[in-house]
Amino acid sequence: MKKSIYMVLDTETADLSGNVYDIGWTICDNKGNIFDEYNALVNETFTDPEKMMGAFYANKLFTHYAPMLFNQDIEMKNWIDVLADMNNAIEDWEVTCIAAYNAGFDFRVMGNTHKNLGYTGKVLSHKVKTLDIWQFACETKLKTRTYKKIAQEQGWVSSKGNLKSGAEFAYRFCSGDFGFIEDHTALSDARIETEILAACLATRRKIPYGKINGSPWRIIQ
């Protein structure tokens, strides 16, 4: 049987509809071993001051991205070149599944960014399985009595009284680092989501491939 290889993807956007400016991913196996990483700023969005000043995490332009660029920890690339890198990575590593935490959001904004920049056709040239790690976590790790108990004790509860289930809280539970604060930069977030994925896979529960809110994958694949 072919070994499962995952691309765990994360995007940061200038708004909720699209305009991806930071994209990162890991290539990993089902135990969370990372074989490769990628991170790039999308030139067309990141250099547009009108879009970027309206970004929710606009302050990270100076606190995070300026030092990353100075230290050459990240590079600036045109969108079409980022997609070429993604397709090459999928082919080179024989990726069997693309996963993301709240995958519906990431897939949708990638499709919208592609369209907004004037490109037609699909984002990806490969057919692979898709997985929403958020959905998987909610069906496994976050469904346990232990999580419910810890979440209530730690105050991981929304104003409406619901237990929080975002990547930050899932990682806190899976790692045991209850004070963890999510970075909200693409590669950093992809790394923690890789660990969450591995923890979910370790439960040996059925993997909810393709169970993505709104099934937006058709936009990009």
Image (cartoon, grey):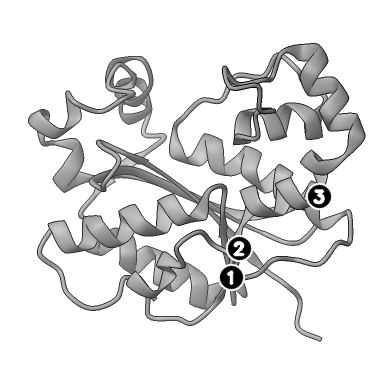
Residue that label 3 marks: 140
As drawn, 13 above or below 34:
above
**Label 2 crowd bin: few (<14), some (14–19), many (20+), radius 10 Å:** many
Do the CB atoms of the residues marked 1 and 2 lie less than 8 Å apart? yes
Residue at 24% x, 58% y is 112
As drawn, 65 above or below 74:
above
Report the Cα–Cα distance between label 1 and label 2. Answer: 6 Å
Per the rendering, the mark at residue 210 is 1
Report the Cα–Cα distance between label 3 and label 2. Answer: 14 Å
Residue at 35% x, 21% y is 67
Location of residue 53 in the rendering, given as x and y in whole percent from the top left corner: 17, 23
Residue that label 2 marks: 131
Viewer-nearest of discs 3 and 2: 3
| Disc nearer the start of the sequence (1/2) | 2
Residue at 10% x, 64% y is 118
Report the front residue among 138 and 125.
138
| Disc nearer the start of the sequence (3/2) | 2
**Label 3 crowd bin: few (<14), some (14–19), many (20+), radius 10 Å:** some
Visible residue check, residue 38: no
Q: Quadrant of residue 56?
A: top left
Report the front residue among 163 and 10.
163
